[in-house]
Image (cartoon, rainbow, N blue to C red):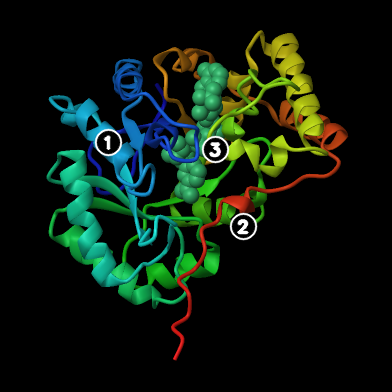
Amino acid sequence: METIRIPGIDTPVSRIGLGTWAIGGWMWGGTDDLASIETIRKALSSGINLIDTAPVYGFGHSEEVVGRALEGRRSQAVIATKVALEWPDGKPRRNASAARIRTEIEDSLRRLRTDHIDLYQVHWPDPSVPAEETAGELEKLRREGKILSIGVSNYDIDQMDAFRASAPLSVVQSPYNLFERAIDADVLPYARNSGLTVLAYGALCRGLLSGRMRADTSFSGDDLRQSDPKFRPPRYHQYLAAASALQRFAADRFGKSLLALAVRWILDQGPTVALWGARRPDQIVGLDAALGWQLSAQDRAAIDGLLAEHITDPVGPEFMAPPLKPSPTI
Ligand SMILES: NC(=O)c1ccc[n+]([C@@H]2O[C@H](COP(=O)([O-])OP(=O)(O)OC[C@H]3O[C@@H](n4cnc5c(N)ncnc54)[C@H](OP(=O)(O)O)[C@@H]3O)[C@@H](O)[C@H]2O)c1
């Protein structure tokens, strides 16, 4: 496994992390806890030590399953969870106040069955709360030893500048994969220049880069891909065509799978970790194929050419952003 150092965390962190959003079930058409536990344990035995979760994933369920899976194995894992979303009526919205952070840390520690969280990340920026309040509270938690390192997620560079005035920041978690590259313009160079690690979420673009998707693939229950614009006409066929072209390129040029190419591409872009979402142990396959080789500048240019050729109407992951807190009405 390739590793990266994150300040505050003694253990080298694997550059492939397990994403456990789907393990929460919510927005992924349900989940099977025993399969989830096996998946987490298989990830650990395959060399992945970073497990990324969040309270909102299944409204506590993902964290609970991670806690169960890590019982007796806590020292093998680097737990990354998040803070600052609330769901008073079952619908998530942002709340990065100090009071909310104080409540959430205790809930997360209990669900995760641990006395500390390795990496604690603000899930979404909350413009209704001053940056120094949010950052200051996280810094207090760090000094108390409840968390070891601080991250933010879905922040732009101005928001990170404001945050870093009050707390040391180690990580920014952002959407990043072959099909979602907005951070190339700003967040990634900022991270490179500021010594931050980028946790690239949606490494497989919610499965579009797994090699499994077909024109007739369907999703059930509350699976978010039913409303994800990349999985809907008119764009779905563009993304599928791009995935097929990339799959051929990976096979012809390197003898690799699309999935291995997608992960390798992220790892070659900078100080990155690829967050790979999986919920069944059979999905933790081919890690080795993504490791120990590199894409050249020429390979990356060829990939860019294939993307431009097939994706004529690109769209980002903005549909996932949770709403802000409603303004108080008088
Ligand atoms: N900070 C944030 O706001 C934020 C937002 C999104 C995600 N994240 C984090 O990033 C993680 C990863 O993103 P993600 O879960 O959205 O999606 P992802 O990694 O892009 O894709 C995950 C999906 O790909 C499919 N897949 C995985 N391995 C596969 C394999 N070997 N073969 C075929 N299909 C495979 C699975 O779909 P099926 O099970 O349906 O087949 C899986 O649920 C999340 O779990 C979460 O930890 C963070």
Within 8 Å: ligand 1 and the Cβ of disc 1? no
Distance between mark 3 and mark 2 Cα atoms: 18 Å
Q: In the image, what residue occupies the spot 32% across and 62% down?
A: 168
Q: What element carries label 1?
A: strand
Compared to residue 202, the image places residue 72 above or below, namely above
Q: Position of residue 52 (x, y in %)?
A: 37, 38
Residue with the most extreme bottom position: 330
Q: Which amino acid does label 1 sit on?
A: Val
Horizontal relation, residue 223 to residue 217: left or right: left
Within 8 Å: ligand 1 and the Cβ of disc 2? no
Q: Nearer the viewer, residue 109 or 139?
A: 109
Within 8 Å: ligand 1 and the Cβ of disc 3? yes
Q: Which of marks 3 and 2 is nearer the N terminus?
A: 2
Which residue bears the numbered disc 2?
186
Q: What residue type is labelled 3?
A: Gly
Q: Position of residue 83 (x, y in %)?
A: 33, 56
Q: Nearer the viewer, residue 136 or 105?
A: 105
Compared to residue 319, the image places residue 79 above or below, namely above
Using the rendered image of the protein, determine whether residue 267 is visible from the camera's viewpoint.
no
Which residue bears the numbered disc 3?
202
Which residue bears the numbered disc 1?
78
- Asked if the residues shown at circle 3 and circle 1 are in contact, with their CB atoms under 8 angstroms apart, the answer is no
Q: What element carries label 3?
A: loop
Q: Circle 2: is it few (<14), some (14-19), or many (20+) Cα within 10 Å? A: few
Q: In the image, what residue occupies the spot 43% across and 52% down?
A: 195
Q: What residue type is labelled 2?
A: Asp
Q: Which circle, 3 or 2, is nearer the viewer?
A: 3
- Quadrant of the rendering where the N terminus is positioned: top left
